[in-house]
Image (cartoon, coloured by chain):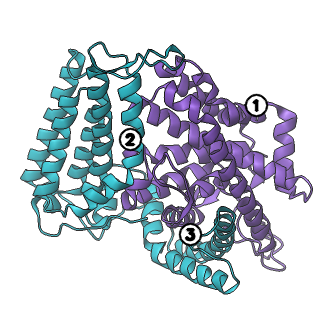
Amino acid sequence: MTDQEQPKTELESSTPLEQPGSTVTQVRTYKAKGRIAGMSIAVLAIWAALYIVASAIPALPVPGMAGMITLNAIMTAISGMILGPAAAIANAAGGIVSMILFPYGFSAGPLGFLTVTMGGLVAGLFMANKWVPAAIAEILIIGSWFVNPQSWQTGMWMVPLPYSAIALLVIVIKPVRDWVRNAIITQNKKTMWLAVFVMCMIGHAAEFLTTNTMVNWMFNLTWQYWVPTLPYWIMVDTVVILASTIVGVGVLVGLKKARLPLFPTTLEK
Amino acid sequence: MFSVSLKSRNSPLQKLDGRTKLIFLAVIFILVLLFTDLLYITALLALVLAAWFIAKLPTQPLKEMLQFFVWIAVIILVVQVFFYPGTTNLVHISKPVPAIGFSGYLTLEGILFGLAMVLRLVVIMIVAPLMVMTTPLPELMLALVKLKIPYKFAFIMTTALSLLPSIQNRSAIIQQAQLCRGISYDSGGKFITKLKASVSLLIPLILGAFRDSQTLEVAMNSRAFGAPIKRTFLLESRFTPVDILVIAGTFTLLTVGVMLRIRGFGVY
């Protein structure tokens, strides 16, 4: 069989450097071996390792929570747009190991990894244009906040409002959703920053509301805690999202320039 | 931030199978969330502390943990003590302030509930390190695999662990390189400086690590990762009679706990 007769096959390899003159088209598939939801397991393992390292690096001191926001908050926010839905797996693996090595950074205890998993999942599904499951996951996260009778107290409805409700709207409204995804995929210089900010907001909102819900169930915190501290938490979340935006844009541009593996946005086809 | 590592090398707890300890961890976590009565949570804390001392673990990590969570503990205590709707008034503080839901009194129920929530936090925080300090990480990973966690997921965790030293090393190198460029990682720096430092560390760290992932992927593919074969492990874990005894005891504890909770015990 000559080279010309060789059928085009789907390879599992994700090496982005295609051989000159090769007739074999490398296609990333969703269910290829050595991949989870389209992302190479090697990349996911590397991401999990990065996540663990980031968990040990204090970034911002935050009174009122477990001492510090570590760099892993930034990693969670940007994971979805870099890894797609597989970010949930990578974050979960990194979260479990970091919880084992640095258990003090997780105020939700052994289930702390769920928060970063949800952050990666919602943002990843959004990036993969799987907006229905993304919206369902976001609604479940917001709904789980309201299932707790504590959340029926005065003003508690405001807690998910600032970012989670906006994130849900972005996921559901098609023109906004398409604009955000296109700006990130095409790396439009004018609109990319805002789009990455929105993506980071979606990831971070899912993470922090899951954390809030778990902490609320575990420690029975009432409106007297949540409502007065709400402006403070909005400020903290905004800082995290802004920092994530700066890192996210840098990483996306860097990955493209270096032709390194990015989440295959063609999966939706 | 400090980390926990294996500290108990010759204790009865260290000799237990990793799965046994994971089951114990899960049961304690479930039970401590089931109860809100101070007495029951204190009993669970006593059980965890007993395990801590049986494992011959040092008390220094306990002190460090308490220092680390003192803020959260204070917030939880204050919220419950002042705002829990108790009926037994103890101390008169001020006139009632309905706008913030304060009755004007500190109540017995509020204090007991606040203490229970703080102890719940303590139990949740010390039970995981107890397991880590008595189990070598490879055994812990093997235990997760044996508990039927998907192999790909376990592989990601074990690979991440094995890559940790090289990524930490790379992180240190990047930090030193950025220091040469005048970017300070000093904890006493300004907020904006810290933010800049975080960005200047994360971007090259992520890009460099992604470059490494290609080598790892080639290595995985060349070893036929994902081939449908039955995997074997370098380490093998087997339940001993002691493990079975501990698991039986743990499940008995869980059953008794659930039964008590169903019958209305252990809650305010």
Whole-percent x, y for residue A62 in the image: 54, 52
Which of these two is toward me, A219 or A145? A219
Q: In this view, does B187 lie to the left or right of A128?
A: left
Q: Cβ–Cβ below 8 Å for labels 3 and 2?
A: no
Q: How far apart are marks 2 and 1 (CA)?
A: 36 Å
Q: Quadrant of residue A157?
A: top right
Chain letter, purple in picture = A
Residue type highlighted by circle 3? Gly
* In the depicted structure, whether residue A138 falls above or below residue A183: above
Q: What is the number of callouts on the image?
A: 3
Q: Where is residue B202 in the image (x, y as percent from the top left)?
A: 64, 68
- Tag on residue A43? none
- Identify the residue shown where x is 39% and y is 66%: B2
Q: Which label number is shown at residue B188?
A: 3
Q: In which quarter of the image is residue A161?
A: top right
Q: Which of A66 and A115 is in front in this view?
A: A66
Q: Is residue B88 above or below residue A203?
A: above
Kindly identify which residue carries mark 2. Answer: B74
The CA span between labels 1 and 3 is 40 Å
The alpha-carbon separation of the residues under discs 3 and 2 comes to 25 Å
